[in-house]
Image (spheres, rainbow, N blue to C red):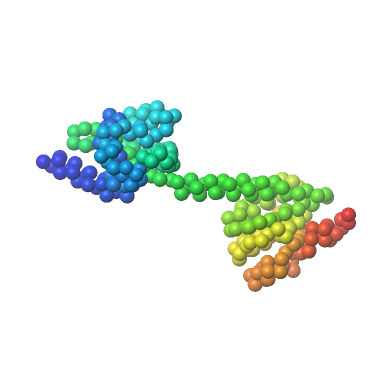
Amino acid sequence: MRETISEIDYLEVMEYSLDPLIIHTDYRIIFINQAAETFFKTTREEVVGGSPLDIFKETSKASIRQRIQSAYGQPAEVIEETVYRSDGTAVDVELYCHPVMIGDKKAIQTYVRDITKRKETEKKQNDLMEEINELSATLVPLMNEIAVLPLSGKIDEEKARLFLEIIPVKVKDQNVNHLIIDFSGVYTFDDIVVNHLFKLTSVLSMLGVRSIVTGLRPEFAMKATSMHIDLPSIPTMATVKDSLSYLGINK
């Protein structure tokens, strides 16, 4: 009687878990909880008795089969996979499985965790890094160890932070002693962005690189002033051409 009660209690706990759970043995599903029904857009009546391999793409089934088999001996490592809901939509998930006893039968319990949002965030981060790298790679060398960094578009906090990390490296790699930072193409910014961008001039100064700011819009300058950024210490010009004249290059 004690063993039966333990089994019922265990399944009740699994039933109300927030993570989708699938219990299967001999490649046959014997239980899914409510969260799994919702996640896979199905009912337990439709899936119990079916194969746990059915949710995977064909190219993954062989490796998943081996993984399930090995999990009877010890918990398997967490992996990322693509699974399919009953309506055919694909979802990126983390999978974790381990052996359990259901009565006197050894089975596998598989946790399914939706990582769609995390993947979207990672993609955004990767795309942003590529964009920053592309932008910093367009550091335009002029002459006599002088280069121009043309900033453009919307600059948010993350992009400004990455500028602080990447631009000093690029400047040193290209042996630049004077960097003209052109703000004329920047149309969106906030206090944090302003702070990061002007902090870049301080970092470059510590590296022996002199910065000249061009194309600074009045509202940008006013915001910097309100933040007590020492603009007079940074040479500012209307245009890149003016900055070249300032450096003694007249063409």
Residue 36 visible in the shown view: no
Question: Looking at the image, which residue sits at the far left?
Answer: 1
Q: In this view, does 244 lie to the left or right of 69?
A: right
> Where in the figure is residue 41, as x and y percent of width and height?
34, 44
Residue 6 locus on image (x, y percent): 17, 43
- Give whichever of 188, 143 is nearer the camera: 188
Can residue 127 be seen here? The reply is yes
Q: Residue furthest right?
A: 251
Residue drawn at x 73%, y 60% is 184
* Res 7 → quadrant: top left
User: Which residue sits at x=42%, y=29%?
Assistant: 58
Residue 154 in the image: above or below residue 8: below
Res 152 → quadrant: bottom right
The quadrant in which residue 14 appears is top left
In this rendering, the answer to whether 160 lies above or below 54 is below
* Quadrant for the N terminus in the image: top left
Q: Which of 124 and 91 is in front in this view?
A: 91
List x then y, in percent, for residue 240.
79, 58
Residue 216's x, y, as percent?
72, 64
Which residue corresponds to the image point at 39% horizontal and 29% vertical from the top-left?
61
User: Which residue sits furthest bottom?
Assistant: 226
Lateral position of residue 24 relative to residue 152, left or right: left
At x 76%, y 53%, the residue is: 148
Residue 133 relative to residue 20: left or right: right
Q: In this view, does 117 lie to the left or right of 150?
A: left
In the figure, 75 relative to 62: above or below? below
Quadrant of the image for the C terminus?
bottom right
